[in-house]
Image (cartoon, grey):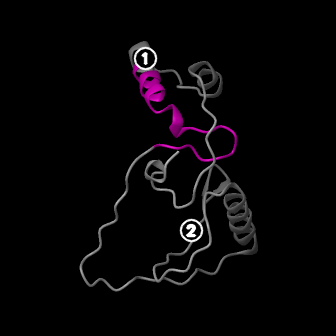
Protein backbone atom coordinates (compact mmCIF):
# COMPACT_ATOMS: atom_id res chain seq x y z
CA UNK A 1 0.00 0.00 0.00
CA UNK A 2 1.60 3.29 -1.01
CA UNK A 3 1.47 6.40 1.17
CA UNK A 4 -0.73 8.31 -1.30
CA UNK A 5 -3.54 5.82 -0.69
CA UNK A 6 -3.55 6.21 3.09
CA UNK A 7 -6.28 8.83 3.03
CA UNK A 8 -6.77 11.27 5.89
CA UNK A 9 -4.98 9.15 8.49
CA UNK A 10 -1.58 10.46 9.54
CA UNK A 11 0.15 7.17 10.40
CA UNK A 12 0.94 4.15 8.26
CA UNK A 13 -1.81 1.60 8.65
CA UNK A 14 -1.35 -2.16 8.67
CA UNK A 15 -2.98 -3.92 5.73
CA UNK A 16 -6.67 -4.06 6.53
CA UNK A 17 -8.49 -7.37 6.53
CA UNK A 18 -10.67 -7.55 3.46
CA UNK A 19 -14.23 -8.57 4.24
CA UNK A 20 -16.38 -10.43 1.77
CA UNK A 21 -19.97 -9.42 1.18
CA UNK A 22 -21.04 -12.54 3.09
CA UNK A 23 -18.96 -11.40 6.10
CA UNK A 24 -20.53 -7.96 5.92
CA UNK A 25 -24.05 -9.36 5.68
CA UNK A 26 -23.41 -11.33 8.88
CA UNK A 27 -21.99 -8.31 10.70
CA UNK A 28 -24.16 -5.45 9.43
CA UNK A 29 -27.88 -4.90 9.69
CA UNK A 30 -29.39 -2.49 7.19
CA UNK A 31 -32.61 -2.47 9.19
CA UNK A 32 -36.15 -2.77 8.01
CA UNK A 33 -35.71 -0.86 4.77
CA UNK A 34 -37.93 -1.42 1.76
CA UNK A 35 -36.36 -3.98 -0.59
CA UNK A 36 -35.32 -1.34 -3.17
CA UNK A 37 -33.48 0.70 -0.51
CA UNK A 38 -31.86 -2.43 0.93
CA UNK A 39 -30.41 -3.21 -2.50
CA UNK A 40 -29.11 0.35 -2.83
CA UNK A 41 -27.62 0.19 0.69
CA UNK A 42 -25.85 -3.10 -0.05
CA UNK A 43 -24.59 -1.74 -3.39
CA UNK A 44 -23.07 1.25 -1.57
CA UNK A 45 -21.56 -1.02 1.10
CA UNK A 46 -20.04 -3.27 -1.59
CA UNK A 47 -18.41 -0.27 -3.28
CA UNK A 48 -16.97 0.91 0.06
CA UNK A 49 -16.11 -2.46 1.62
CA UNK A 50 -12.66 -1.25 2.77
CA UNK A 51 -14.21 1.65 4.68
CA UNK A 52 -15.33 -0.85 7.32
CA UNK A 53 -13.31 -2.84 9.84
CA UNK A 54 -15.00 -5.08 12.34
CA UNK A 55 -11.95 -6.15 14.34
CA UNK A 56 -11.61 -3.01 16.47
CA UNK A 57 -9.54 -1.09 13.94
CA UNK A 58 -10.60 1.79 11.76
CA UNK A 59 -11.78 1.11 8.27
CA UNK A 60 -9.87 2.49 5.31
CA UNK A 61 -11.26 4.52 2.45
CA UNK A 62 -8.73 5.94 0.04
CA UNK A 63 -9.14 9.64 -0.40
CA UNK A 64 -6.91 12.64 -0.67
CA UNK A 65 -7.39 15.33 1.91
CA UNK A 66 -6.10 18.86 1.61
CA UNK A 67 -6.69 21.35 4.38
CA UNK A 68 -6.57 24.87 3.02
CA UNK A 69 -5.41 27.70 5.21
CA UNK A 70 -5.35 31.36 4.43
CA UNK A 71 -2.00 32.85 3.49
CA UNK A 72 -0.25 34.07 6.63
CA UNK A 73 -2.66 32.26 8.97
CA UNK A 74 -1.27 32.05 12.50
CA UNK A 75 -1.58 28.49 13.86
CA UNK A 76 -4.48 28.01 16.25
CA UNK A 77 -3.68 26.18 19.46
CA UNK A 78 -6.46 25.63 21.99
CA UNK A 79 -5.46 24.23 25.41
CA UNK A 80 -6.94 20.99 26.70
CA UNK A 81 -10.19 21.16 28.62
CA UNK A 82 -10.33 19.96 32.21
CA UNK A 83 -11.82 16.47 32.24
CA UNK A 84 -13.37 14.36 34.95
CA UNK A 85 -11.43 11.25 36.02
CA UNK A 86 -13.96 9.11 34.10
CA UNK A 87 -13.42 11.09 30.89
CA UNK A 88 -9.63 11.07 31.40
CA UNK A 89 -9.78 7.26 31.61
CA UNK A 90 -11.74 7.12 28.32
CA UNK A 91 -9.22 9.45 26.65
CA UNK A 92 -6.19 7.50 27.91
CA UNK A 93 -7.69 4.15 26.90
CA UNK A 94 -8.56 5.32 23.38
CA UNK A 95 -5.19 7.02 22.82
CA UNK A 96 -3.37 3.90 24.01
CA UNK A 97 -5.39 1.75 21.62
CA UNK A 98 -4.79 4.09 18.66
CA UNK A 99 -1.04 4.27 19.39
CA UNK A 100 -0.85 0.45 19.58
CA UNK A 101 -2.73 0.09 16.29
CA UNK A 102 -0.57 2.72 14.59
CA UNK A 103 -3.57 4.93 13.81
CA UNK A 104 -1.90 7.94 15.41
CA UNK A 105 1.67 8.88 16.17
CA UNK A 106 3.26 11.40 18.48
CA UNK A 107 3.86 14.79 16.93
CA UNK A 108 4.75 18.35 17.81
CA UNK A 109 2.73 20.92 15.97
CA UNK A 110 1.79 24.54 16.49
CA UNK A 111 -1.80 23.51 15.64
CA UNK A 112 -3.89 21.80 18.32
CA UNK A 113 -7.45 21.27 19.48
CA UNK A 114 -8.79 19.69 22.66
CA UNK A 115 -10.36 16.26 22.84
CA UNK A 116 -14.11 16.21 23.36
CA UNK A 117 -15.88 13.24 24.93
CA UNK A 118 -19.59 12.95 24.16
CA UNK A 119 -22.02 10.37 25.44
CA UNK A 120 -24.34 8.52 23.10
CA UNK A 121 -26.71 5.86 24.35
CA UNK A 122 -24.86 5.99 27.67
CA UNK A 123 -21.50 5.18 26.05
CA UNK A 124 -18.58 7.60 25.99
CA UNK A 125 -17.45 8.46 22.47
CA UNK A 126 -14.22 10.17 21.49
> Quarter holding the C terminus?
bottom right
Residue drawn at x 45%, y 51% is: 7
**Residue 39 has which mark?**
1
Q: Which residue is mark 2?
A: 116
Lower sequence index among marks 2 and 1: 1
Comparing 71 with 35, the one in front is 71
Residue drawn at x 45%, y 79% is: 111
Q: Secondary structure at mark 2?
A: loop
Instruction: Using the numbered discs, state the Cα–Cα distance from disc 2 to disc 1 in whole angstroms.
Output: 36 Å
Q: Residues within 10 Å of mark 2 (few under 14, many from 20)?
A: few
- 85 left or right, relative to 51: right
Number of numbered callouts drawn: 2
Q: Residues within 10 Å of mark 1 (few under 14, many from 20)?
A: few
Q: Which residues are magenta?
A: 39-61
- 56 left or right, relative to 33: right
Residue drawn at x 70%, y 40% is: 55
Residue 106, position as x, y percentages in the image: 62, 72
Residue 94, position as x, y percentages in the image: 69, 61
Comparing 8 with 118, the one in front is 8
Q: Secondary structure at mark 1?
A: helix
Residue 22, position as x, y percentages in the image: 61, 18
Amino acid sequence: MDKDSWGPKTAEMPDPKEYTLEDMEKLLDVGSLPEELKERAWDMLKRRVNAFAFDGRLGHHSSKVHIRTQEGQVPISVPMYNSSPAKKAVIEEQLKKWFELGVIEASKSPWSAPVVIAYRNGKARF
